[in-house]
Amino acid sequence: MSVMSNPATVGSTAATERVRRSITGGKADVKGTIFMLLMLMALLMSVVILAVLVIDMVTQGRTVLTERLGDFVTGSMSSQPEASGILQGLRGTFWIGVFTVVIAFPLGIASAIYLEEYAHHKSRVARFIDVNIRNLAGVPSVVYGILGLTLFVKAMGGIVGPNSNGRSVIAAGLTLAILVLPIVIITSAEALRAVPRGIREAGFGVGATRWEVTRHHVLPYAAPGILTGTVLALARSLGEAAPLILVGATTGYLSGGTEFLDLGALTDRFTALPIIITTWAGRPGEGWVSVTAAAIIVLLVVVLVANAAAILLRNRFDKKRG
Amino acid sequence: MPAVAAVTACLALTSCGGGSTSSVVVSGSSTVEPISIAVAEFFTAGNEAEGNEKVSVSVDGPGTGDGFELFCDGLTDINDASSKIKPEQIEACESNGVEFIELPIGNDGIVMMTSESNTAVKCLSTGDIYALAGPESQGFETWAEADELATEVGGQGDLPDAPLDLIGPGEESGTYVSFVELAIEDIAEERGQELQTRPDYQASADDNIIVQGVQGSATSLGWVGFAFAREAEDVTMIEVDDGDGCVAPTETTIADGTYPLSRPLFIYVNKSVAAENDSLVRFVDHYLGEAVDSVADVGYVALSDTALAETRERWQSRTQGAA
């Protein structure tokens, strides 16, 4: 903002134009224009793909969303598309989100702070850990599903799901929290790395401890970047289906699983929105096509709401930093 | 963090509100799954109306084979099956001490389909089907190429000289297994061939995609379950001749078994769990009682009255093992 309010630049559009012309010799910047158009096309492509998806889903799911949105959102899984609802899926997805926020976020951000602020960057151990975390972020999600199956469902089944052979939403939440942990660590570390050295040095210069510098200067500065990373991680964990299949999400029918805040039911069998979508998509007939589309729209809205919450938070931090 | 603390507290107390005390876990065939789901819905609704203790019911459909692995490990109470339990599955159950009750609950037919615009094919003999899709047909690219083999194995032959676009369920599907058993096994065994389809056909796990594939080519040949074929538009269901004339796949011909490519559907109930878990008993009672119409409601063919009476008798006497 300081540049814009500089009196020397006020009303200088004509001057800028004059200087540019003298540099280019009056020739049009063909290469530059082509480059810009290519970039624009790349951007438009992703926008168009998203638009096609949304339009397609809204057209297919329109009847469900307009005629029985209430029943659809508060209803349970059913053998008939006209009676199907997604409440159980919403509950599962809600708890998976809670586990991600409560477990993956603090652990991930703390790990990133240690790696960036405390660990010696050049030490072999730190570098080894860093490389490994980057690799973990690229491991396919099914592999985490197998990890969740062996670790949480089989080994810890008696704790996470004594009445469901371990196939509980706790096992699913823990699995997805672990799945997104590397993403949280990497993005948080990048955000911390982007904080100018000068800020830390100024802090140390006035005698602040490392913790005080991190807490009061580095973290607030990096908060928007960290939040962006956590948004990506949350969206990923809400949308994953493959690991949930291995952890044992119920695909066909579930009688309970509608009470969001019933903590005792966390050890029962569960399902989640992506699982419901995958199951319904494979069923025959027009009715299933439209409830599948409607469920996809709801999942998109859920992810959007989660993202919007994080963006609002980020703007708050941005203002503070401002 | 408070949420985690609360969850841990709950776990320590083992029972804090809402955790259900009895459950019924159903898994197995994805073909039978819709029936079990419909029954579970009736059961849950009825249970709530009567104000009984809450029963947690879950239904999955990973496939008959995967279902039996879970069932024989004692992880599920009921296994849905679209083909009869196999000797090795019985062995697996026996070695884990799992005793089961076999209950036939309905029938499904496998339907050979072609595009509606294909008027040259109305009826195929089982020999023709073997010659078009069996293990010896690999490489046949037109219907007519199968003529010689068809007549050799007792089919009618005289197939149209048109491209053959084959599409069907993949090997992991229960429908594949039944297709092999119903349409291919007899002839293949006689001729010392492997019990399988030809490998070079378009395979899909999704019945919708198979139907789309059949619609997409004027000279296609595909096969799916009766429930899917009946829902499909722009396809012709081909009649099948097993030596007694052409029989079209209909509810009647499948229920009485005159349509050659039909198969029975089962549920397998864990006997020792049934002895302890009252909810499971009530669930199966419901399956064979008030909810038995679900079989027809979700698109399969209901048992005849005598067959249903036999099934009920097997359940009442807790007859162990396969028939």
Image (cartoon, rainbow, N blue to C red):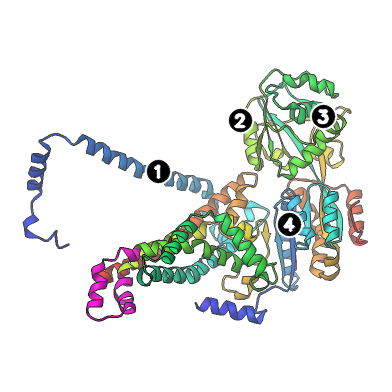
Q: Chain of mark 1?
A: A
Q: Which numbered disc flags the more N-terminal residue, 3 or 4?
A: 4
| Pointer 2 residue | B216
The correct choice, above or below, for A281 with respect to A107 in the image is above
Magenta extent:
A191-220
- Residue A257 visible somewhere in the drawing: no
Q: Would you say A104 lies left or right of B101 here?
A: left
Query: For mark 4, what is the residue?
Result: B27
- Disc 3: which residue: B126
> Can you tell which of label 2 and label 3 is closer to the viewer?
3
- Label 3 sits on a secondary structure element that is helix
Query: Whole-Å distance between the Cαs marked 1 and 4?
Result: 41 Å
- To which residue does mark 1 refer? A48
A34 in relation to A319, above or below: above
Q: Quadrant of residue A95?
A: bottom right
Query: In this view of the protein, which residue sits in the foreground, A278 or A69?
Result: A278
Query: Which is more toward the observer, A103 or A300?
Result: A103
Q: Callout 1: 10 Å neighbours few (<14), some, many (20+)?
A: few
Local SS, label 2: helix
Residue A282 shows which numbered tag?
none
